[in-house]
Image (cartoon, rainbow, N blue to C red):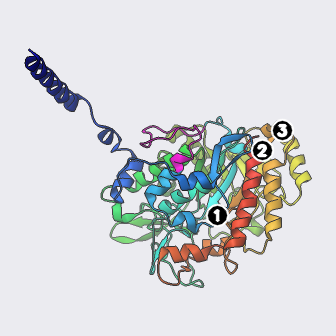
Amino acid sequence: MKTIVKKINVQVLGILEQLANKYFKSADELNRDIPVNKMLVALGFDFRLHYDKWSANKAYHAVNNHNKKWIGQIVPVEILERSFKKAIESIVTLSESGIFYKYFPKIVVSPNYGDNWGRHANYIEINNRSIAEMIGNKCSSGLISTIKMLPAIPPSAKSWANCVVLSQIFPNIFGDGYNKAPWEENSIYGIKLNAGYSRNIVNYDILNTVSAEDQFRAFNDLAHFRGIKTGFRTVISEDQIKIANLNKQDENFRWNNDEHLELYIKEHVKLIKLGFEAIFVDSAKHIGGVDCANYTGVGRLPSYEQMQYILHEIRLRSGNNALSFVGEKSSIDFDMYKNMGLTAGTALVSADYFDEVKRWSEWFKYRREYAPGPEVSNDNDWGGSSYEQRLNRINSCLFGFEFASDKLPSFMQMEDLFPLRYDTSTHHLMMFNPSYSIDNTPISHWKNLFTAEDGRWYNHLVGEKFAYALDL
């Protein structure tokens, strides 16, 4: 009798297993199509994740909220030299929910700070080209390097978001995919549309299995999981834009050409649909003929009405009303920028004076759609600021208000968190694309691009300021 029962149980289990195989997918199958996992597999990893003790031991946290965590007191090479999988495991280990996910979640939602989140955000621009993998004279995979940097970026606070802005998305006009000597121009400000995405940024070796679009989706999912918003820099000076044509010479971009205007909008809408939520608009202050004596771009800018149309159409076609458009610099005609569709402007408020930032915060407390904000440094920074000056500016940006709900937007560069070597600068890296490797390897470049132990201590001091700010 026992033998008969045993046979029946085996048969039942076999039937159940067949049904399970037919109707239910394994965890691996269910997770295979997630962009993060596509990248893991393409780069030679499985996607079962493991708790990362190294990240847990290096983690800083908000003073009164131990779940808001990031890696502090580091020099960037320490995270850039880690594998892509270790970067994912680090991000998941620092999960703000306190839950460790053995598999990266299928659905990740951007942190919700309302439709006007960009009016109060801290924007941190990361030059993803300069931290790309430099092997010989080749430059690639800047997006992977930026993903590796995400664990070291503080998450958003209670009342406002931190937003990472990527310096490069589109191919640059000359030398894309290559580094050059420190004196050979390779400007990030000259872009090519209708040509996909920069070889400096996308990993083209895995393009057959992971599209450029999925690589951007993976980046945005990982940033959003970290509690960080994302955006990218764009240019609007027409002689700094070219249009690629198949089997023909590149075409000069012109704002008075309706086809060019339409292409410009489509290229930006496509990126928003991949998960980006902010666009930093270079030279936006000068639209409408404002202060053109100090305009340093090359070529005509869009008219005021064209810029209104562009920003309106990006919002409309992307179906996202919670986008932030940041204009480089601002003037005192704030309604002009608000009515244009911008959310924030830079550099009008000096971060050197805490009380001045606080006064501007008070003046703008009832303006919830657009505000100018202070900056620690910008893309034109040629270096020379002391650590003390940068820390003082960060302090003004993070605490210059009476109430956290009245905070002004603020702006900083990668160098303001991770100091660069002394003979280069943010602007130099925007204009040129040198490798600082002494043995043609990426690790040597990353090690020599940034300062060493003094940079580590500075990063610790920055971390202390964010530790208090994230509670607000």
Name the amino acid, label 1: Ile
The chief SS type of the magenta part is: loop
C-alpha span from label 3 to label 2: 24 Å
Name the amino acid, label 2: Asp
Q: Is residue 310 magenta?
A: no
Name the amino acid, label 3: Phe
The residue that label 3 is drawn on is 403
Label pair 2/1, CB-CB below 8 angstroms: no
Relative to 215, say whether 402 is above or below.
above
Q: Say which element carries label 1.
A: loop
Going from N to C along the chain, the mark reached first, 2 or 1, is 1
The residue that label 1 is drawn on is 74
Q: Which residues are magenta?
A: 91-111
Going from N to C along the chain, the mark reached first, 3 or 2, is 2
Relative to 5, say whether 90 is above or below.
below
Q: Position of residue 177 (x, y in %)?
A: 45, 72
Q: Foreground mark, 3 or 2? A: 3
The residue that label 2 is drawn on is 335
Judge the density around disc 1: few (<14), some (14-19), many (≥20) Cα neighbours within 10 Å: some
From the viewer's perspective, is 137 left or right of 395? left
In this view, the residue in front, 84 or 127, is: 84
Question: Which residue is located at x 65 percent, y 76 percent?
Answer: 428
C-alpha span from label 2 to label 1: 42 Å
From the viewer's perspective, is 217 left or right of 363? left
Q: Position of residue 119 (x, y in %)?
A: 72, 43
The reply to whether residue 128 is visible in this rendering is no
Q: Is residue 103 magenta?
A: yes
Residue 194 falls in image quadrant: bottom left
C-alpha span from label 3 to label 1: 31 Å
